[in-house]
């Protein structure tokens, strides 16, 4: 996604909203892939039904923690690794969604001009 430079005018509101929608779509795709991977892992390593695997993966991605405690050794390793991954995904998605807003604020207020002085 291309952003305007300091010397170009601020993007129109419609361009900004399209940019935000694009970033939101990317974050949603990352979330969907992460949720799917968690569901597959919980179903495979813990033998959970898909709805229970969905619940556990969604709770970890939401920062709440798993509902069903893992009982197998492989399931415990997967749950720990997935919990670490889920924390990183949360930070990455927040950055993806916030990037257009931060850029617009910096561009509008010319905060990057302080480097030129």
Image (cartoon, helix red, strand yellow):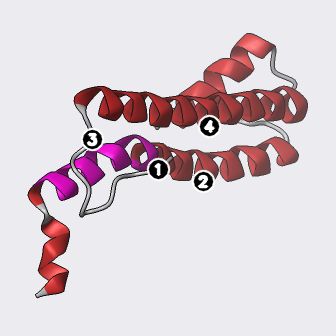
Q: Earlier in the sequence, mark 3 or mark 2?
A: 3
Which residue: 72% across, 34% down? 38
The answer to whether one can see residue 67 in this image is: no
Mark 2 falls on what kind of element?
helix
* Callout in the foreground (3, 4): 3
Could you say where residue 74 lies in the image, as x and y percent from the top left? 86, 46
**Disc nearer the start of the sequence (1/2):** 1
Q: Which residue is mark 2?
A: 84
Residue 102 in magenta? yes
Q: CA distance from mark 4 to mark 2?
A: 15 Å
Looking at the image, is mark 4 or mark 2 earlier in the sequence?
4
Q: Position of residue 61 (x, y in %)?
A: 55, 35
Q: Position of residue 65 (x, y in %)?
A: 53, 36
Between disc 3 and disc 4, whose residue precedes? 3
Residue on which the image places disc 4 = 30
The magenta-colored residue range is 95-108
Most prominent secondary structure in the magenta stretch? helix
Quarter the C terminus occupies: bottom left
Image position of 11 with respect to 3: above or below: above
Looking at the rendered structure, the secondary structure element under dot 4 is: helix
Which one is in front in this view, the residue at disc 3 or the one at disc 2?
3
Q: CA distance from mark 3 to mark 2?
A: 37 Å
Residue positioned most to the front: 8
On residue 11, the disc is 3
SS at circle 3: loop
- Find disc 1 in the rendering and name its residue: 2
Marks 4/2 in contact by CB < 8 Å: the verdict is no
Tell me if mark 4 has few (under 14), some (14-19) or many (20+) residues whose alpha carbon lies within 10 angstroms of its own.
some
Mark 3 vs mark 1, CA separation in Å:
11 Å
């Amino acid at each position: 996604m291309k952003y305007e430079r300091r010397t170009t005018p601020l993007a129109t509101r419609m361009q900004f909203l399209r940019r935000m929608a694009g970033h939101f779509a990317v974050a949603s795709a990352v979330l969907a892939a992460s949720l799917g991977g968690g569901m597959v892992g919980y179903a495979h390593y813990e033998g959970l039904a898909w709805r229970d695997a969905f619940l556990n993966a969604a709770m970890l991605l939401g920062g709440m923690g798993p509902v069903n405690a893992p009982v197998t050794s492989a399931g415990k390793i997967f749950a720990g690794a997935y919990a670490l991954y889920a924390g990183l995904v949360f930070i990455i998605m927040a950055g993806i969604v916030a990037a257009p807003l931060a850029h617009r604020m910096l561009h509008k207020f010319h905060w990057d001009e302080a480097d030129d002085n």
